[in-house]
Image (spheres, helix red, strand yellow):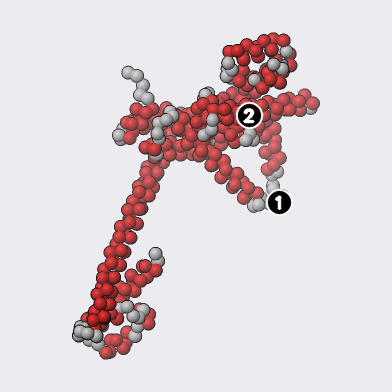
Amino acid sequence: MAEASDYELLDRYAGGDEPAFEELVRRHQKTIYDLAYRMLDNHADAADMAQATFVQAFLHHTTFRRESSFRTWLFQIGLNLCRNAIRDRARQQHENVEDLPLAAPHDTFAVTAAAQARDRLGSAIRTLPERQREALLLRIYHDRAFAEIGTIMSCSEGTAKANYHHAVSKLRRVLVADEGTRELS
Amino acid sequence: MNCHDIQEMTVPYLELDLSPSAVRQVTDHLEDCETCRVDMEAVRQVLVRVKGRTVPDPGEAFWQAFPEQVRHGLGRGSSAGMLYAVRWPLALAASLALLMGAWLFAGIWDWGGRSDQFAGASKSSSASKHIAQQDEPDLADMDWEREWDDEDPDIVLATMARRLDRATVDRLFRGI
Ligand SMILES: [Zn+2]
């Protein structure tokens, strides 16, 4: 028997079918967790955000117009939640800077700088502008077509492509500079 | 096409996102141009290295428990949603109850007012006088002792009860 489509499972879930709910979550949990982890860079936040993505999707499943795939819709919800979490985190860090003691027992900035030097590519990806980073993650790790990336990011296919190309160019410059530094030292 | 044009097409070339004719142009150029070949390889390396970054697997136990976690969150979400859903009907019911109360009181006041209007022409009952008095003093201004001394205790108690109600309703409406 052919595997049930996401839409069919969603209909069954709406009719109170618990196994359909479980099947839908299992089908997409790794994808959404992967996206959340790549956006938020740690397991705890990624797990929370992946859970919140499914909760939002199931709570509002009646508003899903089915103009895209269920997975695209999950990507949209997940990406929005991650964006908000990153903004909240930035706001919080900004507020906490004022609470930092003037002479920290361990030099936080030196530790961060050392960690970043070990993972130049990682920090280069992290510091990409939001839209470029999202396009890069969706394209490289989730293999989405640019048209779908546009749908997920609420922009045109052309804008999604441009964001991706800018991201790759920027990373290339960082890596070239990095190679140059390594050759010099 | 010059080198700059070709380098602009590097990413789409590697992404297989070019028309067949453009692919042929880039391929032809790469065969003769060392600079563009190096550039192409650099971009390819970026893509390979980015692609090679893995996410640590949280483990089978995490994946097994995940749907239950979602269900848990959904349970909380649903009950929150349900609270939200009943919040407005509750608020509506409360408003209706207040309006009913207001309507009843308005009816009594109107009746009291009309009684007052006709008080001069016809002989009004002592009851209507008492009701007309309801519009006058606030609870705090009342001289309970005097009322208690002058009147029949039963009538005073009934009047006090009505005034208490009025005061309560006034308080409720002040909050809206
Ligand atoms: Zn060239």
**Image point 49% across, 38% down: which residue?**
A49
In the figure, B108 relative to B79: above or below? below
In the figure, A123 relative to B33: above or below? below
**Image point 28% across, 86% down: which residue?**
B148
Image disc number at residue A47: none
- Discs 1, 2: same chain: yes
Could you tell me residue A3's position as x and y percent?
36, 21
Quarter of the image with the N terminus of chain A in it: top left
Q: Identify the residue under disc 1.
A: A102
Q: Is residue B92 visible?
A: yes
Could you tell me residue B166's position as x and y percent?
31, 73
- CA distance separating discs 1 and 2: 36 Å
**Could you classify mark 1 by the number of other residues whose Cα lies within 10 Å: few (under 14), some (14-19), or many (20 or more)?**
few
Q: Is residue B33 left or right of residue B150?
A: right
Judging from the image, mark 1 belongs to the subunit labelled A
Number of numbered discs visible in the structure rendering: 2
Could you tell me residue A139's position as x and y percent?
55, 26
Question: Element type at marker 2?
Answer: helix
Amino acid carrying label 2: it is: Ala
Q: Identify the residue under disc 2.
A: A167
| Along the line of sight, the residue nearer the viewer: A55 or A136 | A136
Q: Is residue B58 visible?
A: no
**Image point 36% across, 53% down: which residue?**
B87
Residue A28: which quarter of the image?
A: top left
Amino acid carrying label 1: it is: Leu
Q: Is residue A98 left or right of residue A44?
A: right
Residue B113: which quarter of the image?
A: bottom left
Judging from the image, mark 2 belongs to the subunit labelled A
